[in-house]
Structure formats: structure tokens, C-alpha cells
Amino acid sequence: MTLDALEAERRELASAARRLRVAAMSDPQRAEELADTLVELTAVRLLTWDVLDAATDAPESVVLAARILASRGPSGPYASLADAGRYAAASAQLAAVQAGLGQADAAGRTLDALEAWRGQLGRLPLRESLPDPVAIWMLVARARALLATDVAGANAHADAAEVRLAGSVAPPAYLAVAVHLLAADCRWAAGRPDSALAHHRLALEAHAGALAEAPSATRRPAVARIAAAPVTAVHEPYAGRLALTGSTDAAIALRRAQVSLLDGLGVPDAAALARAGLAAALVAAGRPSEAAALTVEPPSPPATPAPGERADWAPLEGTAALSPADPAAARARWQQAEQAAVFAGVAARAEAERTEAALRAQSEADAARRAQERAEAERRAAAEADAARRAEEAALARAAEEAAQRAAREEEAAREAAEARRRALAEEHRPAVDPEAARAAAEELEAARAAVRAALSDAALAAAQDRLAAVLRPLAAVDPGHRDELAAVLESLVGLLWRLGDPDGSRAAAREARTLG
């Protein structure tokens, strides 16, 4: 039955169960129909990997089947085979649900109770009439219950489940997935990694076959959810065990396939988790650049337990094996499938190594190209920064030079302005040139000098120097050689006049002396 058909049947049975629950409240005769519907609904949910929803109906199914069985009288060889089969199926499904939820002890107790009840049936051919899925779920649940404490017993029950599966006609795909994953776990615990990987391969192929028969899985969300439900269980342990046995490239390739599958099914949350697992595997393999390209933060990968110590076991005998009609032929088919899976796994690992080597080489080439581009970009940036720095330094130097030139020009202009003011002031105080006065002054010059030398008091000296200054002024206007003598006379007058109590005269003499300087 395809995943599309299973989804349609699940919807129909869920609707029928809701109607029958209401009807059975007022009509107890509908209880048997409700019990059969619940058994069928739980079976379909198990076959669509919907353990959580199956857990809501499986306990009710067991209770209702037990109530109907008890209403017909005590259990024994003359009990109704249909009622007994319904109760056995409901109990097997409950044990499978409990095992699927990780409640191995509860699953074991459910099966122990079923076995104790079956012992009351005597010659009733219950085991012989069990449908293949019910018998297989019994064996799967028992193996899961034993795996933690009795590895040999768990492997014996896993073998029996594989044989019953191989003897079934067109078994449901997800039932095969469950059986192969069980066998993989049991073989791993028994220290047989090659066989465990082969059964992982069988589970992978069974799931791929189910997807191939579900063309609407990428279009209908309900079918896509069913298609994606076992993806993690099929891929994650397989990848972890491949990596632990040294097949790192095969493990990475398997995780790539998981991401691609979930992306194709449109399950973003599961795809994100798978992508994070792939990133962690790439980091662990020393390929961080490829992990970084996934743009996810790789988590700490869960530790995969090492294979257990090697264990041997004997096959189940008698009715406990729940064997198919032709167990020898079924066992041969299963062993052939296992051997083919071993060879297929070897070929797949070789192909994965080639593919991953090419991807690794491409990633390294891309990383080298990006590094070269980054180095070139850094070189260009450094050159541009250096050019900008030099241009800035040149601009600053030009600005400093222009400022210095401007300051020099301003200083020169200030000097020229000061010189011009000095010359203008000198011109203002220069007396008009009178040749006659100059000749007269020349004639009086020696007498004026002699008067200065002959002066005996400050007052007489001040009067004599004032007279000498008056004689020297017209001479200095004609002959610059007399300017220094005139300036010296005026400087002497500045002090004399100040001492004689004539500050105004002192200041006038000082101003005239400065004009001469």
C-alpha cells in the first residue's frame, strides 16, 4: 500500500472511529465495530510512522478488545478466534507503540501479559492465524524490550522478524523499515558492525522504495509529513555508525542526501536540523569551509556508541519464532538481501568517497580562489589607503607651504607699511630746505658746539643744546651726515628737559629723535 493510500485510509478510519465512539455510547452493539476500527487505525498509524497519534488510541483499543473478549466467557480453547485475534493484535500494537516511544520495559510487560493470556487458550490456533504485521510487531517489540539486557535474545527475535518479513507478500514499506532498523541496532549491540550497516542499508532502500511510490509526497503536506517521518531514524544512526567505522565520506554523503530529501519534501524544520548535523560532520572531518557555506551553527554532534562486544545467539524455535509458512525460503531471501546490501553499501561508500573527494577539491579550490580574491582586495584597499594618505600628506604640505608664503607676504607687507609710515612721519617732521638758512647754520655750527662744551649748569646746557639742535636741523635736511649728531643732541635734551621740569619739551624732543631713527 502506497503512502498516499495509507494517508487516505488513515483519514477515513479516524473519521469512522469518531463516529463509532458516539454511536457506541447509545448502542453497545457497535462496540465490536469500534474495536475493529481502532485496531485498523492503530495499524495504519504504525505503518505511517505516527507513533504519537497511535499512542492515543492503542490503550483504548486494548481495553475495548479485552472487554469484548471477557463478555463472551472465560478464555480457553473454545474462545472466539476473532475476539482472541483482535485482542492479540491490539496488545501487539500497544507494545510496538511503547517500544517506539522508548518505553522498552513497558513493552516487555505488555508482551508478558499477552503471553500469559495466550497460555490459557490451549489448542486455539491463535499464533497460526496472526496476520504478518501483528506477528512482526510482536517480534519487534520483544527485541526492543530485550536489547538493553539480553543482546543475544534481542538478535534472535530480530532474526525472526526479518524471516517473517521476508516470508510476507508485499509487506508495508515502513514495517520493513522498522524491522531493518531493529536488526541494525541489534547487530551493532552484538559487535557485528558490517551486518548492522547492511541492515541500515536495507532500511534506507525500503524508505526510498516507499517514496518512489508516492508521487504526491512533494505536493500534499499530509503525505509529505508521512514521507519525512522516518527520515531521521533512517539516516542519523546510519551516518553516525558509518563515521565511527571510518567511512567518514560515506557518512557525510548520507547526511547530504538527508538534507536534500527533507528540502524536497518541504519540511524546513527537519531540514534545518539535518543541515546542522551535516555542518557538524564536516567540521569533525576537518572541512570547516564547507560547513561555513551551509550558514548554520554546527551543534555538538551526539556521541554514537561503539559496537558492543561480539555475541552469538541461536535462532528462535517452535511457535516463539512466529515463522512464516516456508521459513527456510524466507530465511534464504533475507540472507540474500542482507548480502546484497553489504555489496551495495561497499559500492555506495566507494562512490561517496569519489564524490566527496571531488566536492572537497572543489571546496578547496573555491576557498583558494576566495582567499586570492580577498588578498587582492586587501592589496587594492591598502594601495588605495596609501595613495589617499600620500595625497592627504601632500595636501597638508601644500597648505602649510601656502600658509607660510601667505604669512611671509603679510609680514613683508607689514614691514613695508611700517617703513612707509616711518618715511611719511619723517617727511612730516623734516623742515623745508632753505639754502640761506643752511649756510647761516653752517657758519654758526662751531660756535653752537663750543657753547655746549662751555655750559656749566643743566639749564645752560639745555639752552646750548637746544641752540645746537636748531643749528643742526637745516644742515641735516641738506646733509644726512648731520642727522646722527642731531639725534644725539635731541636724546640728551630728552633727559635734561625732564630733569629741569619741562616734560612737554622732553616728549617733543623724543618724538623728533624717533623720526630721525
Image (tube, helix red, strand yellow):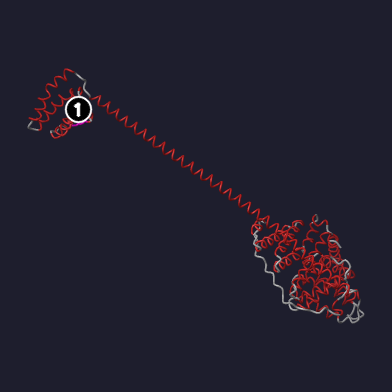
Q: Quadrant of residue 200?
A: bottom right
Please tell me which residue lies in front, 51 or 303.
303
Start and end of the magenta stretch? Answer: 506-513
Q: Quadrant of the C terminus?
A: top left
Residue at horizontal 25 percent and vertical 24 percent from the top = 428
- Residue 87 horizontal/vertical position (percent): 86, 74
Q: Is residue 517 above or below residue 99?
A: above
Answer above or below: position of 262 versus 413: below
Residue 270 seen anywhere in this rendered image of the structure: no
Q: Quadrant of residue 288?
A: bottom right
Q: Is 402 on the left-hand or right-hand side of 87?
A: left
Q: Residues within 10 Å of mark 1 (few under 14, many from 20)?
A: some
Query: Residue 191 location, x and y as percent?
Result: 73, 75
Q: Is residue 27 magenta?
A: no
x then y, percent, for residue 250: 73, 63
Q: Residue furthest right?
A: 78
Quadrant of residue 238 within the rendered picture = bottom right
What residue do we see at 43% from left, 40% from top? 397
Check the image and report above or below for 48 versus 387.
below
Image vertical order of residue 115 relative to residue 341, above or below: below
Residue nearer the viewer, 339 or 405: 339
Check the picture and name the quadrant holding the N terminus.
bottom right
Answer left or right for 516 relative to 150.
Answer: left
Badge 1 marks a residue whose secondary structure is helix
Task: Report whether residue 451 is seen.
Answer: yes
6 left or right of 149 in image:
right
> In this figure, what is the number of numbered marks?
1
**Pointer 1 residue:** 483
Horizontal relation, residue 361 to residue 181: left or right: left
Residue 341: percent from left, percent from top: 80, 67
Q: Main secondary structure of the magenta part?
A: helix
Q: Amino acid at mark 1?
A: Arg
